[in-house]
Amino acid sequence: MALSKLMHKRNRYKDIPPGFAYLTSKYPDFKQHVQINLNARLSVNFKDPEAVRALTCTLLKEDFGLSIDIPLERLLPTDLLRLNYIHWVEDLIDHQDSDKSTLQRGIDIGSKLSKPSKTST
């Protein structure tokens, strides 16, 4: 099943995935995380946290005008999937039966990776 079938209908990447060729030409920091796969297409290793971090920072800069620095110890879902999550939260808020004149909010609670502590026996 193609990833686009799982994406929210309002996800900007649903029908047009990020253009890695364009992004590598514009963002040298991102370029080092892009490889050519067996189909001769540019790809990113989504199992590599540094590659995901570089892609996320690049897409946030390119598509949303945001320059951010994400610490290495933070969990980092890809923008492609994070956008789905944001749209789903918007849908939940929009479909509540409460008074529409009341300000409604959603909250995203992040996480921090922690290294296992060494215990002595």
Image (tube, grey):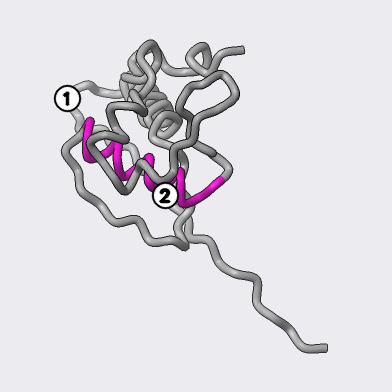
Residue under the point 33% across and 15% down: 10
Question: What is the three-letter code of the residue carrying label 2?
Answer: Ile
Q: Position of residue 56 (x, y in %)?
A: 36, 41
Q: Are marks 1 and 2 in contact (CB under 8 Å)?
A: no
Query: Can residue 82 be spotted in the picture?
Result: yes
Residue under the point 58% across and 43% down: 47
Task: Choose mark 1 or mark 2, whichever is in front.
Answer: 2
- Horizontal side of residue 51 vs 21, given as left or right: right
Q: Position of residue 63 (x, y in %)?
A: 23, 30
Is 47 contained in the magenta span?
no
Residue at the bottom extreme, as displayed = 121
Whether 16 is drawn above or below 36: the answer is above
- Horizontal side of residue 26 vs 121, given as left or right: left
Residue toward you, 7 or 39: 39
Label 2 element class: loop
Residue under the point 24% across and 23% down: 99
Q: Indicate which disc residue 89 carries.
A: none
Residue at which label 1 appears: 101
Is 57 contained in the magenta span?
yes
Answer with mark 1 or mark 2, whichever residue precedes in sequence: 1
Q: Give the magenta-colored segment's residue range.
A: 48-63
Question: What is the three-letter code of the residue carrying label 1?
Answer: Ser
Label 1 element class: loop
Q: Quadrant of the N terminus?
A: top right
> Of helix, strand and loop, which mostly describes the magenta segment?
helix
How far apart are the two marked residues, 1 and 2, measured between alpha carbons?
26 Å
Q: Position of residue 11 (x, y in %)?
A: 35, 19
Whether 64 is drawn above or below 90: the answer is below
Query: Can residue 96 be spotted in the picture?
Result: no
Residue at which label 2 appears: 109
Residue toward you, 22 or 71: 22
Residue toward you, 15 or 37: 37
